[in-house]
Image (cartoon, rainbow, N blue to C red):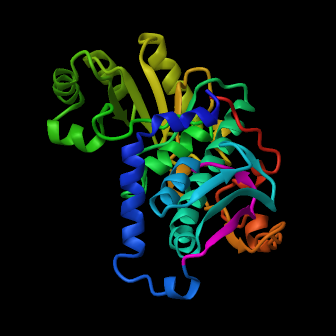
């Protein structure tokens, strides 16, 4: 699916509720500067000042709809951003434009950052010839999960389970509480019945075999080094070829290719949401004619001094089709 079509996944009522909550957080009472700007109809240009992938248009639209402003887009969802790029224009009462400005920019910057990081991870994995799933995790910002999970999809990654009800994932603490792997999987299978898959976190081949024998659909090999991961996955698949294998823990954009292999079905990275740098956008009011082009991002941002390996991918990034 093209990234543009992903907006259909987002219920309008949910978008409106999120946008309303974000705006109330930023302005719960008096908006003093509204008296400075006044209600005259104005226009503002949205500029992208750092490279990456554009994501979050539906959230941006929903925020400005809440304050009676209209957005005209010049770039589609999932577009590769080459700074400085004019992305959109927003039209509405001046005090409303500025009421929505920071909330909308924060949301777009965060969502685009996640999409950019996800796209870089997918590109790194595909560069090895691996055809499995690059996925995010539940390591998301409280109250902002829908935005970040949506950003993963725009970037071409899988969102993984959205919440605890999307998959019965038996982690190490669940096994400890249950007593052993077999008991944990038995209880999980009872509640999952036919509707949900059961995944079990394992720290050794023995645990993985026990989980598969007990009826797990997927096994999560957590915090394995690549030299341990691949032979473990191969041995498990030899006995249980239909069991899915997910690799996770300590995986970054820099070492991701080492985890790609023929016996690995899913590679999940918490850093896609936890460590993705926000992209730099600005919204500038203008009176008429062509809006002035702002200066680009700071050298630090352009050089990508983020420590997560994303910079090397963004310059040549090809946004994957979903």
Q: Residue at x 34, y 80 (%)?
A: 29
- Residue 77 versus residue 196: which sits nearer the camera? 77
* Residue 65, image x, y percentages: 49, 56
| Horizontal side of residue 25 vs 37, given as left or right | left
Q: Is residue 202 magenta?
A: no
Q: Is residue 45 magenta?
A: yes
Query: Which quadrant holds the N terminus?
Result: top right
Q: Which residues are magenta?
A: 39-56
Rendered residue at 57%/36% (across/down): 157
- Judging depth in this view, the residue of 21 and 300 nearest the camera is 21
Seen in the picture, residue 230 relative to 313 is either above or below; the reply is above
| In the image: residue 288, left or right of residue 190 | right
Taking 136 as reference, is 116 left or right?
right
x 45%, y 87%: residue: 32
Q: Which quadrant is home to the C terminus? A: top right
**Looking at the picture, how far across and down is residue 44, in whole percent?**
68, 67
Specify whether residue 255 is in view: yes
Residue 43: x percent and y percent? Answer: 68, 67
Q: Nearer the viewer, residue 67 or 227?
A: 67
State the image quarter where residue 79 is shown. top right
- In the image, farthest residue toward the front: 40
Residue in the image at 81% along x and 73% along y: 295
Image coordinates for residue 7, horizontal then vertical, percent: 53, 38
Tell me if residue 284 comes above or below residue 143 in the rendering. Answer: below
Quick check: can you spot residue 139?
no
In this rendering, position of residue 180 left or right of residue 57:
left
């Amino acid at each position: 699916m093209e990234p543009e079509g992903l907006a259909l996944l987002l219920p309008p009522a949910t978008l409106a509720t999120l946008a309303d909550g974000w705006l109330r957080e930023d302005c719960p009472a008096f908006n003093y500067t509204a008296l400075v700007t006044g209600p005259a109809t104005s226009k503002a240009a949205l500029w992208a000042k750092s490279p990456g992938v554009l994501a979050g248009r539906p959230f941006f639209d929903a925020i400005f709809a809440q304050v009676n402003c209209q957005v005209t887009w010049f770039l589609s969802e999932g577009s590769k951003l080459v700074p400085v790029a004019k992305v959109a224009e927003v039209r509405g009462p001046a005090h409303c434009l500025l009421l929505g400005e920071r909330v909308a920019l924060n949301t777009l910057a965060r969502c685009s950052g996640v999409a950019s990081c996800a796209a870089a991870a997918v590109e790194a994995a595909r560069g090895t010839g691996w055809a499995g799933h690059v996925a995010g995790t539940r390591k998301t910002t409280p109250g902002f999960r829908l935005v970040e999970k949506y950003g993963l999809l725009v970037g071409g990654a899988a969102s993984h389970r959205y919440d605890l009800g999307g998959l019965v994932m038996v982690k190490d603490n669940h096994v400890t509480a249950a007593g052993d792997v077999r008991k944990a999987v038995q209880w999980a299978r009872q509640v999952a019945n036919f509707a949900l898959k059961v995944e079990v976190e394992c720290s050794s081949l023995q645990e993985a075999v026990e989980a598969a024998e007990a009826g797990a659909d997927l096994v999560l090999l957590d915090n394995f080094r690549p030299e341990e991961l691949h032979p473990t996955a191969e041995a498990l698949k030899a006995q249980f070829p239909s069991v899915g294998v997910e690799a996770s823990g300590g995986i970054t954009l820099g070492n991701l290719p080492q985890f790609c292999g023929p016996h690995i079905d899913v590679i999940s990275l918490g850093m896609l949401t936890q460590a993705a740098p926000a992209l730099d956008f600005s919204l500038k009011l203008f009176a008429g004619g062509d809006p002035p082009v702002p200066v680009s991002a700071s050298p630090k941002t352009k050089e990508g001094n983020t420590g997560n390996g994303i910079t090397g991918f963004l310059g040549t990034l090809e946004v994957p089709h979903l």
